[in-house]
Image (cartoon, rainbow, N blue to C red):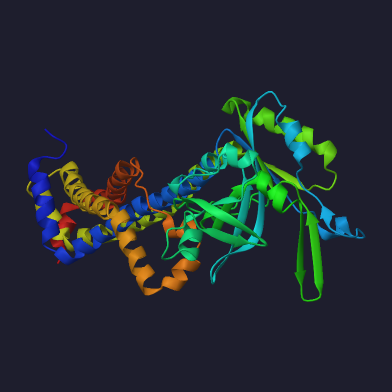
Amino acid sequence: MHLFSLRTWQLGVKALLLHPLRSLLTVLGIFIGVASVIWLLAIGEGISAKAQEQIAGLGAENIIVRSIKPPSETTAGMSGPVPYGLTRADYDRLVRIPTIKDALRIRELRRQFRFKDRLLDGRLVACTPDYAAATVQSVASGRFISAADMINAKNVCVLADGAAARLFPYEQPIGHAIHVDADYYQVIGVMRPRASSAGIGGSLAAQDFSRDVYIPIQTHWKRIGDTTVTRGAGTFEGEILELSQITLRVRSVDDVPRTAEVVEATLQPFHKKSDYAVTVPLELLEQARTTRLMFIVLLGLIAAISLVVGGIGIMNIMLATVTERTREIGIRRALGAKRGDITRQFLAETTVLSALGGVTGILGGLTCRPLSALARGFMESTFPTAMNDLPELVRSVEPQIVGWSIPLAFGISVAVGVLFGLYPAIRAARMDPIEALRHQ
């Protein structure tokens, strides 16, 4: 004889249909629990995947060394522009490390760009031809900086998509010249849109690529130089900086940790003011993966609370049902039903409730992506300013359904239903038939 015969299931469903609203509310508790498990894990996975994508965009085989301006107290008493940060000599030292495949030099400055009467405050990036590949960017039209541009220190530039849209809303940018300080730079290319990178600690600030203008680094050294001066109302500030960043590409991922130690040891003797920082994306990626697991466990526990609450609801309803059906239980026992039959009857009812809640909860959980996209579209159209002020990570994150969360949530929902329905079922089975028949 089967543990649950077809007749047992039929009687269970029929008993639940006698109180449809009560059964529906009980199913709703399980539905919310299962859907919340899938939703929270999907949102957590989406946030984690976006963060890992941004870190991975820095390159698992890369080591990033950035200049950091030392605190003002370390330069107190020094007159004139203050030198700090990475130098061209540092670059020459680092490229001699055997495990380094190649290196990328970058110099960044805040500048105002002008074409006719249109102005743009953005970032002037002096770089080499490898910069586009290193930052995972591609050209939309024209071309990027070439080796010939570098050798001849040409006055050419490439515009990021946002810079091109701001300075050339009606014209084709390529072939025109934009004004930067006292020089003109001919536009030779426009880049495709590139999402902002997240800030990582204090050594690698968040970068918005949309307002960049790229020029050959040799042109920067020839036209602008290493000294920059900022004048304000009654203030004068100057600094000497040769390189803002050196991105090192290691021959093998396995060599990254050891190479990072060598880089630190190579630079330390020449920098006594702590004016640089070494960032290893591979280590950050491993930390992000560990954080992802912790995040998933935390969100899973929070969502599991909803399932427990739903289970308590099942127990509450089934205890009330046992009290209501005391006379029915007595009649069934008098007609020969055993305790096991009564237990199976009530367990079948709780299993049906929890399974139905689990199935509907899964369907509700699978609507996570379309509903979140709909909500984001509604918020962007209703509150555009508030949405634009949010970080790029928040605005662009998309929930990603975690495959194993679906069977896990369903299994837990059924288990919760059975566990929380077991006590009412046993209580009903242990009821004295004579006393049950006397119940009014």
**Which image quarter: residue 128?**
top right
Looking at the image, the residue that sits furthest to the right is 77
- Where 426 falls versus 27 (above or below)? above
**Which image quarter: residue 81?**
bottom right
Image coordinates for residue 173, horizontal then vertical, percent: 46, 57
Q: Nearer the viewer, residue 217 or 308?
A: 217
Image coordinates for residue 395, horizontal then vertical, percent: 44, 60
Tally of numbered tags: 0
Going 72% across and 27% down the picture, which residue do you hit?
Answer: 96
- Say which quadrant the C terminus sits in: bottom left
Looking at the image, the residue that sits furthest to the bottom is 233
- Say which quadrant the N terminus sits in: top left
Looking at the image, the residue that sits furthest to the top is 98
Q: Can residue 374 be seen in this view?
A: yes
Q: Can residue 311 be seen in this view?
A: no
Q: Which of 24 and 186 is in front in this view?
A: 186
Going 77% across and 76% down the picture, which residue do you hit?
Answer: 233
Left or right of 303 in this view: 328: left
Q: Which of 341 and 348 is in front in this view?
A: 348
Left or right of 102 in this view: 355: left
Going 86% across and 55% down the picture, which residue do you hit?
Answer: 74
Image coordinates for residue 335, horizontal then vertical, percent: 6, 48
Left or right of 333 in this view: 267: right
Q: Which of 353 and 318 is in front in this view?
A: 353
Image coordinates for residue 409, horizontal then vertical, percent: 32, 46
Left or right of 56 in this view: 349: left
**Which image quarter: residue 270?**
top right
